Amino acid sequence: MLELSSQNVQASSDKAIVVEHLCKVFNVTKGVLRRTKTQVVAVKDVSFEIDYGELFGLVGPNGAGKTTTIKMLTTMLIPTSGTATVLGYDIQKDVKKIRERIGIVLGGERGLYTRVNAIDNLRYFADLYGVPVNTQEKRVKELLQFMGLWDRAQDRVETYSKGMKQRLHLARGLINDPQIVFMDEPTIGLDPEIAKETRNMIKELAEKGKTILLTTHYMFEADELCKRVAIIRNGEIVALDTPSGLKKYVKDTSVVEIEGFGITEKEVAKFKEVPEVLSISADLSENKQVLKIQTPKGSEIISDAQDILKNSRIYDLKVKEPTLEDAYLRLVEGSVK
Amino acid sequence: MPQTLRVIYSAFRMAMLHWIADPQWVIPNVIAPFVFTFVALTLFKEASGPFGLYAVLGGGMMGMWGNTLYSSGFAIEFEKWQGTLEEVVATPSNLLHVIAGRSVSNALFGLTNMVAILLIASLVFKVPLGVANPILFALSIVLTLLSVSALGLIFASAFVLSRYAQVFTNGLEFPIYVISGSMFPIALLPFWIHPASYLLGPTWGIEAIRIAAAQESVSVTFCLNVGVMLLITLAYVIIAAFLFKKVETKSRRDGTLVQA
Amino acid sequence: MSLLRIFFSSAVFSFKAQFSWLYPPMWLAMKLVMSLSQMSFFVFVGQFLITTGSADTNLIAYIAIGNAVQTLAWNTVFSVINITSHDKWDGTLPLVLATPAHRLPLFIGRAMLHVLDGMMSVAISFVYAIFLFGVNFGNTDALALIVTVFLTAFTMAGFGLLIGGFSFYFRNPLVFANIFTFILLIFCGVNFPVQQLPQPLQVVSYIFPLTYGVDAARRAIEGATLTDIAPLLGQMLIVGFIAIILGYILFRSFENMTRKTGQLEAV
């Protein structure tokens, strides 16, 4: 159906991506009349390697440096220091060679020419990527069919739903039949149905042998798709392992999940003072509050909980095995290390 | 087709598609040239001689420039605004070629101004519109178009590199109409402006267009004008290429390929 | 709403009036450059005609003065429209409309700044006319001229309110502003007498206060006193006030429309 090459043309490296101490500092000038300069460290020090054919995940909260890292690897940003190679090519010296061979899916509402249709969008980028003219038409059609956009292919992109635009981004990311595809939060903002379909497409691509580096802040997504996951926080990688490897960080802990009403920041703060509490994440919305407490002594924390929450109402209390998400929360909140 | 030409053509086609989607946007950029030509035609009405054609041709060139200045000048900013600049830079194609395609389409659409003026000139002002050498005429128009587009490229990069450049857009429209001698011979301008006039490709272009309209035979002056214009255009392209490289490196360093 | 439209209206056109306010040196530079370029363009066209014997030297003075006075159109009309349309784009319009302040004084108050700005432009242009193009201001009746320029700026600002009032109904008011300011060059006796226009078009000229203003300014520079040009100024004021009233009516009807439909535009 969708013909994409499943063989990788090896460059002079046995790793698809090699990153060594990449760092990116932005100089930001603010103000109109009186201009003040500040420095923002987006990526402090990041190093990792990705194998050919691997589906690799870069996970972290907003502002952690995921997007910045991807943009450096895809030559859209010049690093402040550090080196990296993609397919054996240096990201600063062999820019054109890298651009020819990779695909980028940044997603979002923008990044597409909304006043023209999907076919024209893809044709345009096919031209810019130098896709041979005789393959172009076929590939555009195949990609649009693969993404389920063929019936709406003649309509202006501004009439597309969010999910459709995302799929068009994906199609565009594959237009040059790239060896590596970089995806920045590919399922963000999508309806669960569409997100699921998208994940399946990503899995299919990986099965065809494409190397994929994706960023996400959904742990279950990383768990489902990725062979290995790097957790990035404040511009640094705090953990890099397979999903099961990461879960081991939290293997000696349980997660006590409490659902209640009337729980405030004050109570959350009190929990933090309890020595057995390794970390606590709180979702305090108006109608319901959910606390997730990581502790080595699962059931023993219950009496502390009842004490702290004596003025609130507890609807439900569960003691669970930690998931990858919990491992992530632990790592990101910094209670490990 | 070599890849460079393919990219330029593709960008040109994309720009055309956008114009077709929103054709009204050419209007604001050609208002000034249109009005100026109308005024010139009215003033020239009392005069004896081929002034009508003079005004129309000058107006056409002004239309090319007016549209190019705004549309090409903002070409890169527009991509940034659409959110597509990053995606375009991420391709192996040179941004210069991409914007060049857009610039050419802008100049071309600026020419539509000439069509409107031609109609008014012949209908309202009863100006006879015969052209002595249609082939050379068309050729000189095309070459002037390319020259104007190349100048537009310089503006496209300048606008990204300097915040102030954008504000000066407005200040640049009229001076060029004056300095290029679009509606009157440059000889009338003070001598110290002449160097600036001669450095502008369109100045030579408009002269070539006038010659082709008036004379049937190929003259040395015509060839001289075309030749100099081509040289200047080449210089523009070289300068633009240099500036574009700076634009891209700076944007990639500062992270300004996307709107903040 | 098309991104393209928002982009062009906010980025391209708002620079003209708005941006220059942010940087005083820039504002001055723009003023100096734009007045000169426009004037010199037409002066040289006129010069061209003179060298071919198709016009006499008075044409230069005619053109220079005409363009000098017309420069206030940029500031007054454009800026007024920019203010009113800016409210709309910024989303502050609903808030402005919600204040109990009397509309008319509110708008007139803001327009005053631009009236003064416009007068500055004219002054600069007159300087160019005298020193660069040799126009003789020796016989000028200063009082008559100053009053003329002020009243022209004022009535044109009023006209801007009228245009602004119309433009609320459309998505892109700044295109109107642009077209309008240039159209004045054709209709207001700026570069040639109104009589040289095709007959049917001449009627249009008398809608614009500028037509009267340019005429009065020329006379004042030739030596006419305030009493001499009073009738002209009177006509201009009438036209100006009609424009202000019509503009005001349009604003109020727009306001009512938004209250009824909850939309900020009709198109």
Image (spheres, coloured by chain):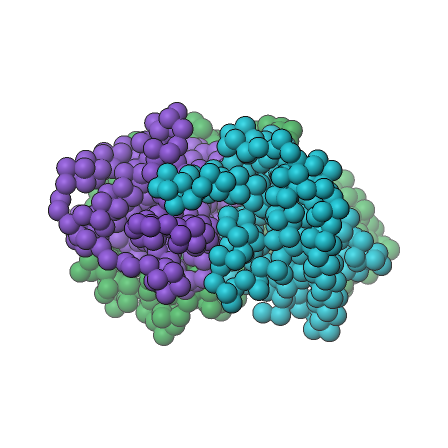
Evaluate whether residue C141 shows in this view: yes
Q: Is A17 on the left-hand or right-hand side of C221? A: left
Evaluate whether residue B238 shows in this view: no
Instruction: Residue at 79% x, 44% y: name it.
Output: A270
Furthest residue in direction right, as rendered = A311
Say which quadrant the N terminus of chain A sits in: bottom left
Closest to the observer, B224 or B229: B224
Q: On screen, C197 above or below B191?
A: below
Colour for chain A in the figure: green
Residue C253 point in image, percent of width and height: 73, 69
Residue A85 point in image, percent of width and height: 32, 35
Would you identify the image quadrant in which residue C167 lies?
Answer: bottom right
Say which quadrant the C terminus of chain A sits in: top right
Q: Is B52 on the left-hand or right-hand side of C179? A: left
Closest to the observer, A213 or C111: C111
Colour for chain B in the figure: purple
Tally of numbered tags: 0
Q: On screen, A231 above or below A190?
A: above
Q: On screen, C134 above or below C245?
A: above
Instruction: Residue at 30% x, 49% y: name it.
Output: B49
Furthest residue in direction top, as rendered = B192
Colour for chain C in the figure: cyan
Would you identify the image quadrant in which residue B197 lies?
Answer: top left
Closest to the observer, A283 or A316: A283
Furthest residue in direction left, as rendered = B217
Q: Is A163 on the left-hand or right-hand side of B185? A: right
Residue B100 point in image, percent of width and height: 31, 45
Closest to the observer, B87 or B185: B185
Instruction: Residue at 48% x, 57% y: name it.
Output: C196
Residue A264 point in image, percent of width and height: 79, 51
Instruction: Residue at 67% x, 60% y: name it.
Output: C162
